[in-house]
């Protein structure tokens, strides 16, 4: 079931965190680390007995629990901590988990990272992956938002989409919500809800792509690397789609931690990802995310997202 922006807002704050915690029940809590001596830490930093790791939801989040095992095993080995994998239901679930201190390490969308960082400067990016080139995805630590329609329909231009049904991803998505609302709406001269007849949230980029292919929505804004996932799984073919619009490059999903963790723990978390390409068993994980390696990132790398958010907030005030 798809949600309109209004419905998505209503469904959120009061139930997201509690629902997702109960839904998780640490589906992969059996992933434990090796027992190693724990260094002495200052009382002013966080030194939890276990680290909770969470990722933003995708169509295959459950499958990714197993695919992330080389990562969580390596993190457990380096930090000497038990690793608990948190199963989220939305971008906001991960953000709220980190804000509460329940989640220590996570993967966010660029937009949800900026929102989280504004609320709590303790949430800090440390890495992202450098993508391999794909069907629409370009090589490097960036991606684009694209507007796609199904080939063979009458929707072959932006003008042909006036009054039709648009699929967005999630309120916390950069390419599936923020970029369309700021950049694309600026190009067409009006808000999405005014240009399109109906705007719905599908829940993920993969679901948006499939919804276009199945005719459930007339068009959708999706991330290039997530669009590629659908093609690579054989759920659709590249030639089944028109690409009517592309955004400027966007930095890839940030891997973040709470910077209030003790320094040695943060160092080991960074090492987990930045040296992952050299670890046995990591190839399957890197192949799954279509990457050869992780690269170091810092907060300023996401200033482009802050500029977009600022523009969106200012436009909202005017309206």
Image (spheres, grey):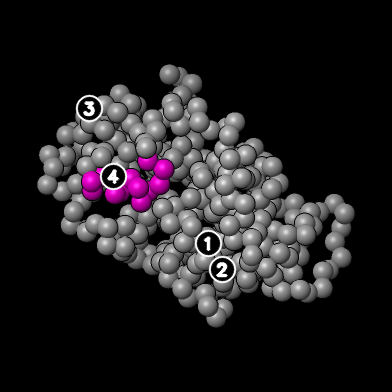
Q: CA distance from mark 3 to mark 4?
A: 18 Å
State left or right for residue 32 relative to residue 178. Answer: right
33, 191: nearer the viewer: 33
Q: Is residue 51 left or right of residue 4?
A: right
Q: CA distance from mark 3 to mark 2?
A: 45 Å
Is the residue 73 above or below the residue 137 in the image? below
User: Foreground: 28 or 154?
Assistant: 28
Dot 1 and dot 2 residues touching (CB under 8 Å): yes
Q: Is residue 267 visible?
A: no
Q: Nearer the viewer, residue 30 or 289?
A: 30
Between marks 4 and 2, how big is the CA–CA gap?
Answer: 30 Å
Q: Label 2: how many residues lie within 10 Å, few (<14), some (14-19) or many (20+)?
A: some
Measured along the vertical axis of the image, is residue 315 above or below residue 1?
A: above
Q: Is residue 301 left or right of residue 42?
A: left
Mark 4 → mark 1, Cα distance in angstroms: 25 Å
**Rendering coords of residue 214 (x, y %):** 23, 46
Dot 3 falls on a residue whose secondary structure is: loop
Q: In which quadrant will I find the N terminus?
A: top left
Q: Residue at coordinates 87% horizontally, 65% vertically from top-left?
A: 40
Q: Main secondary structure of the magenta part?
A: helix
Residue shown at 46% from the left, 61% from the top: 63
Calculate the distance from the C-alpha at mark 1 to the C-alpha at mark 3. Answer: 40 Å
Tag of residue 163: 3
Q: Earlier in the sequence, mark 1 or mark 3?
A: 1
Q: In this figure, which residue is indicated by the disc labeled 4?
A: 211
* Residue at the spot 82% in from the left edge and 69% down from the top edge: 38
Q: Earlier in the sequence, mark 4 or mark 2?
A: 2
Q: Is residue 75 left or right of residue 166?
A: right
Task: Find out whether residue 195 is within the magenta segment.
Answer: no
Mark 1 crowdedness (10 Å alpha carbons): few <14, some 14-19, many ≥20: some
Query: Residue 65: which numbered mark, if any?
Result: 1
Q: Give residue 6's position: percent from left, percent from top.
A: 43, 26
């Amino acid at each position: 079931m798809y949600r309109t922006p209004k419905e998505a807002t209503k469904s959120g704050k009061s139930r997201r965190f509690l629902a997702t915690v109960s839904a998780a029940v640490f589906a992969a809590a059996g992933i434990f680390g090796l027992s190693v001596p724990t260094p002495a830490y200052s009382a002013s930093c966080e030194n939890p007995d276990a680290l909770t790791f969470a990722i933003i939801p995708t169509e295959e989040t459950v499958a990714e629990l197993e695919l992330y095992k080389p990562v969580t095993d390596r993190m457990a080995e380096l930090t000497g901590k038990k690793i608990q994998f948190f199963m989220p239901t939305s971008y906001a679930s991960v953000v709220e988990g980190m804000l509460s201190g329940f989640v220590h390490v996570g993967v966010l969308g660029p937009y949800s990272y900026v929102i989280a960082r504004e609320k709590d400067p303790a949430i800090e990016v440390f890495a992202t992956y450098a993508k391999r080139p794909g069907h629409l995805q370009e090589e490097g630590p960036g991606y684009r938002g694209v507007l796609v329609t199904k080939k063979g329909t009458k929707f072959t231009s932006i003008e042909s989409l006036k009054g039709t049904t648009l699929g967005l991803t999630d309120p916390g998505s950069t390419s599936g919500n923020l970029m369309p609302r700021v950049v694309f709406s600026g190009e067409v001269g009006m808000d999405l809800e005014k240009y399109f007849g109906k705007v719905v949230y599908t829940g993920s980029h993969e679901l948006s792509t499939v919804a276009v292919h199945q005719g459930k929505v007339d068009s959708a804004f999706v991330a290039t690397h997530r669009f590629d996932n659908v093609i690579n799984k054989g759920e659709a073919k590249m030639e089944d789609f028109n690409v009517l619009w592309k955004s400027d490059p966007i930095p890839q999903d940030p891997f973040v931690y709470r910077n209030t963790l003790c320094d040695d723990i943060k160092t080991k978390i960074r090492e987990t990802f930045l040296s992952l390409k050299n670890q046995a068993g990591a190839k399957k994980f890197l192949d799954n995310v279509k990457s050869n390696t992780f690269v170091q990132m810092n907060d300023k790398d996401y200033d482009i997202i802050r500029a977009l958010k600022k523009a969106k907030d200012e436009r909202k005030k005017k309206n």
